[in-house]
Image (cartoon, rainbow, N blue to C red):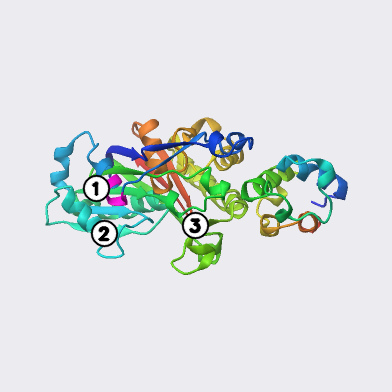
Amino acid sequence: MLISEISGYVGELEINLAERFPNQLLFEKTGISSVYETTLTTKEIAKRAVLSLPTLSALDEVNLLLLITQSPDDFLPANAIPLASSLGLKKELLAIDLNQGCSGFVQALCICDKLIEHYGTILLVTADRYRNKLKQNDRSTNAVFSDGACAILLKSDKNFKLIYEDHITDGSKRDWLFQSTLAENDGFLYMSGPEVWMFTRSTVVPQIKKALEEASSQNLEVRRIYIHQASKLVVDGIKKLLGVEGLVAQNYSRRGNTVSSSIPFLLIDEPFELEKKECVIFAGFGVGLTSTVAILARN
Amino acid sequence: MEIMVQEKQLCSLISKAIGVEEKLVNFDTKSSDFPEWDSLGHINILMAIQEHFGDDYQGDPSLASAVSVREIFEAIQT
């Protein structure tokens, strides 16, 4: 499976955090000076991301549209269906939503890798608008989350293969990061930052180490490690514990935490090229709590 | 690894981590006493503890969910 093209759209309204939360030295903790908010719908930011793809003619070949979002405009139908129509995609395709957050992109890669031979070309879209889920006075969430969307065109290519995947799904930690349609937290998003931060250190780091060992055992050279850009606290913490700081890509200071789009945006900013026997590692983690680590290698 | 932590030492570390005056933090201080001790502030405390005492606590859920100096002290001692 080849990641053929990627494009993105970030919220049009820039929020300067030093102005919003004066005298709080947030930047040194989060590494994020501005976050971005959109007034558009999820389907609209998804559409804008897709229409920014370099080769729009490739959309004619899409047989599966997979939309990763936790900010659906509609409960029904699946948001991917009207998105497909608004993009002018053919009607003879499968279009489905996947309700996953910061792990969503990597989880979707794992799924698409199993489907790509059948569908040939898959359009993966990540789109989230977390900012309208946030309590105004909750600086911990307001200081990191941004709205954004990415479009990723996946094509069948036997030279590239997801050779390894490792999933953690722990619903017992649901209360650490959630938004409910019920009355919990007044309907706003709740995140227990310390517990999620601990999870990244106790669970995600060993998972990535395991993937590094797997790459080594297969004599693969790891070119880059792409991890979810939660914030400086998380990314720097993981880098330090991994002990391979130079390999870990980062861009959290550019757009903030764009949830399911954070790794796709990272791929836009720091693209990779693989020679034979080289690989990259992806690590998505967060709401669930979930964590998925995968290795994409060139044969 | 067993670490003996002095109460005063812990109060000092926590006050610096959340950016409040040291004299305002004591053994009975709760997170709700300071707006600075929110989710971000608590991560700063955890980072300070790990920097000071090592990474032995990186998977300790009681430290992450602690809401007072006393609870943090007890989590570190156990």
Query: Mark 1 to mark 3: distance in Å?
Result: 28 Å
- For label 3, count other residues whose C-alpha is less than 10 Å away and answer few (under 14), some (14-19) or many (20+): some
The residue furthest bottom is A182
The dot on residue A96 is 2
Q: Is residue A181 left or right of residue A60?
A: right
Identify the residue at image location x=50%, y=42%.
Answer: A212
Q: What residue does disc 3 label?
A: A189
Asked if both marks, 2 and 1, belong to the same chain, the answer given is yes
- For label 2, count other residues whose C-alpha is less than 10 Å away and answer few (under 14), some (14-19) or many (20+): some
* Marked residue chain, label 2: A
Residue type at mark 1 is Leu
Residue type at mark 3 is Leu
Identify the residue at image location x=46%, y=46%.
Answer: A283
Helix, strand or loop at mark 3: loop
The dot on residue A123 is 1
Instruction: Report whether residue B6 is seen.
Output: no
* Marked residue chain, label 1: A
Name the N-terminal-most of marks 1 and 3. 1
* Marked residue chain, label 3: A
Q: How many marks?
A: 3
